[in-house]
């Protein structure tokens, strides 16, 4: 870049053109000497002085958003100027200011952007209105260069990725284990998504340099139907002020760019935890049922996966926390283990340990598993819907369906309990084969206990079919779900029902308050 930019070049070319034409024009009386004042240093753009002023801005900037750090590091490395060319400023600046002026309509606070300063400086640059205070030409252009970049990165990052990172926000909330040297936390947000990164910010900087500002500003706008529904309600003058923070929080959720969405699929299963409802959709067919989710101490993690298998009469491998809090004190009580159909197995060898030989140290050791036999009375119910995840979380039936009548259905250790397991099983089948459906129904009602008479007699009054009358040809233990069906476990406190109408739900895990605290400085009120 040359040291001095010829700001008056355009004006001079106009004068020369007017002198060479034969027609009388309004410039006929204009002389070259009339532009003499513009040749003074007060109107000369100097790249070195601009960079000096930018360095002062970098040192004075202590803002802590990710785009702010990238802006400082970019100009701290004395990289290319992005908005200032040999001809001054072009329409890219106007395009950006157009979007920023309308940011409050998109629920973004004007506090994110020094809009007033940028508009004033752009006016000075366009009208050559400079002075000897803090508005010398190179100071004005330095401010424009720095603040346009910072505002561009802030705006595009907010619209493309949201104002907060949910993993950072949620995955250090609940302590899993803690000792003198280490603290581990529960993973509460495990949905694959795009993240604001250095690479993403570099892409945005290249868009400025390559004159793709307008295209990129359009590209980063959230596209989901939910985002526009929430935004319309937020901007509705009839929306109560008390509802605005909740709408803002759910708008923030809708800005997060997940790798997959339910609407990308013709067939899927969706659980929105605050609603305590499951919605299974297959084209125009919709199945809706109540669910129970994890308690506030054992929250159900948010995730997405694919249901690939159904297990009928599954065994339940009991979590260590339950063994330590509820089971270990019954060590030596064979009747307790028989009544609950618990047995103990060595983890590595798979060998069953007779209950009379089970010691307290075995129950306290991760080398031994306590397992509840499948069948009537199993805590997982009669069927479980499995999908890959790192939390041992599944959808499953329940042995205590009475809780579905409650409004607050946070009852589990993290899994999702479903109200209509047989209906869900049939829904998941691609081929609704009557024989397969009959086997599932039969197996879910059969007494398949193998623990002997003592265990069976405890439960005989609950079983509809006894072991002696089992039709083994109708017993089925596994059903493969082909093709696998996407499952989404999400968390919205304002979300559309099956008719597409927005519904309001209680914030059962308190996540709204956490998000609101993080975004409050940066959202329009």
Image (tube, rainbow, N blue to C red):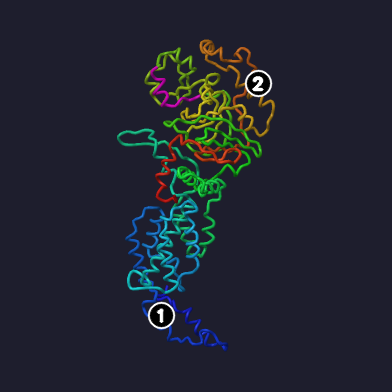
Asked if 332 appears above or below 518 in the picture, the reply is: above
Of tags 1 and 2, the one toward the viewer is: 1
Measured as percent of width and height from the top left, residue 64 is found at 37, 53
Residue wearing tag 2 = 474
**Residue 179 quadrant:** top left
Segment tinted magenta in the rendering: 316-329
Percent of width and height locating residue 133: 32, 71
Q: In this view, does 351 lie above or below 108?
A: above
Is 320 magenta? The answer is: yes
Residue projecting furthest to the right: 434
| Residue bearing the label numbered 1 | 38
Between residue 467 and residue 253, name the one nearer to us.
253
**Among the two numbered marks 1 and 2 on one chain, the one whose residue lies closer to the N terminus:** 1
Q: Position of residue 301 (x, y in %)?
A: 47, 36
| Residue 184 included in the magenta stretch of the image | no
Q: Residue at image x 60%, y 35%?
A: 280
Quarter residue 114 falls in: bottom left
Q: Is residue 14 above or below residue 289?
A: below
Q: Position of residue 464 (x, y in %)?
A: 60, 15
* 136 or 308: nearer the viewer: 136
Between 236 and 482, the residue placed more toward the observer is: 236
Task: Describe the element under mark 2 as helix, strand or loop.
Answer: helix
Secondary structure, mark 1, is helix
- Front position in the image: 115 or 150: 115
Magenta segment main secondary structure: helix
* Tag 1–tag 2 contact (CB < 8 Å): no
Q: Which residue is drawn at 56% across and 50% down?
A: 223
């Amino acid at each position: 870049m040359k040291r001095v930019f010829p700001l008056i070049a355009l004006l001079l070319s106009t004068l020369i053109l007017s002198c060479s034409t034969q027609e009388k024009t309004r410039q006929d009386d204009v002389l070259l000497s009339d532009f003499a004042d513009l040749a003074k240093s007060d109107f000369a753009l100097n790249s070195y002085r601009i960079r000096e002023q930018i360095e002062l801005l970098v040192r004075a900037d202590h803002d802590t958003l990710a785009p702010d750090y990238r802006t400082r590091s970019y100009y701290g490395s004395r990289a290319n100027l992005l908005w200032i060319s040999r001809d001054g400023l072009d329409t890219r600046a106007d395009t950006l200011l157009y979007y920023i002026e309308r940011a409050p309509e998109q629920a973004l606070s004007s506090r994110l952007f020094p809009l007033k300063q940028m508009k004033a400086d752009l006016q000075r640059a366009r009208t050559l209105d400079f002075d000897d205070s803090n508005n010398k030409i190179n100071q004005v252009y330095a401010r424009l260069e720095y603040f346009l970049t910072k505002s561009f990165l802030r705006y595009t990052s907010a619209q493309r990725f949201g104002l907060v990172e949910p993993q950072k926000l949620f995955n250090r909330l609940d302590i899993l284990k803690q000792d003198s040297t280490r603290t581990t936390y529960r993973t509460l947000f495990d949905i694959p998504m795009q993240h604001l990164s250095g690479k993403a910010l570099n892409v945005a900087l290249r868009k400025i340099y390559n004159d793709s500002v307008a295209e990129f500003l359009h590209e980063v706008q959230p596209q989901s139907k939910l985002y526009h529904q929430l935004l319309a309600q937020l901007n509705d003058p009839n929306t109560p002020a008390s509802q605005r923070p909740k709408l803002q929080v759910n708008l923030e959720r809708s800005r997060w760019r997940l790798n997959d969405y339910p609407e990308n699929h013709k067939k899927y299963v969706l659980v929105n935890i605050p609603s305590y409802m499951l919605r299974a959709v297959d084209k125009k067919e919709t199945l809706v049922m109540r669910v129970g989710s994890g308690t506030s101490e054992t929250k159900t993690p948010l995730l997405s996966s694919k249901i690939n298998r159904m297990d009928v009469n599954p065994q339940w491998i009991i979590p260590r926390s339950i063994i330590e809090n509820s089971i270990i004190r019954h060590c030596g009580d064979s009747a307790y283990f028989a009544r609950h159909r618990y047995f103990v197995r060595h983890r590595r060898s798979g060998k069953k340990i007779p209950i009379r030989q089970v010691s307290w140290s075995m129950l306290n050791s991760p080398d031994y598993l306590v397992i509840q036999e499948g069948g009537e009375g199993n805590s997982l119910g009669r069927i479980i819907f499995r999908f890959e995840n790192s939390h041992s979380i599944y959808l499953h039936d329940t042995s205590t369906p009475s809780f579905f009548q409650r409004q607050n259905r946070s009852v589990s250790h993290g899994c999702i309990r479903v109200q209509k397991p047989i209906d869900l099983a049939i829904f998941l089948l691609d081929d609704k084969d009557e024989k397969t459906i009959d086997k599932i129904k039969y197996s879910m009602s059969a007494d398949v206990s193998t623990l002997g008479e003592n265990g069976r007699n405890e439960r005989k009054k609950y079983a509809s079919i006894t072991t002696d009358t089992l039709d083994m040809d109708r017993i089925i233990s596994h059903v493969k779900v082909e093709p696998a069906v996407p499952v989404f476990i999400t968390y919205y406190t304002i979300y559309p029902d099956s008719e597409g109408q927005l519904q309001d739900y209680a914030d059962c895990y308190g996540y709204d308050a956490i998000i609101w605290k993080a975004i409050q400085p940066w959202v329009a009120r």
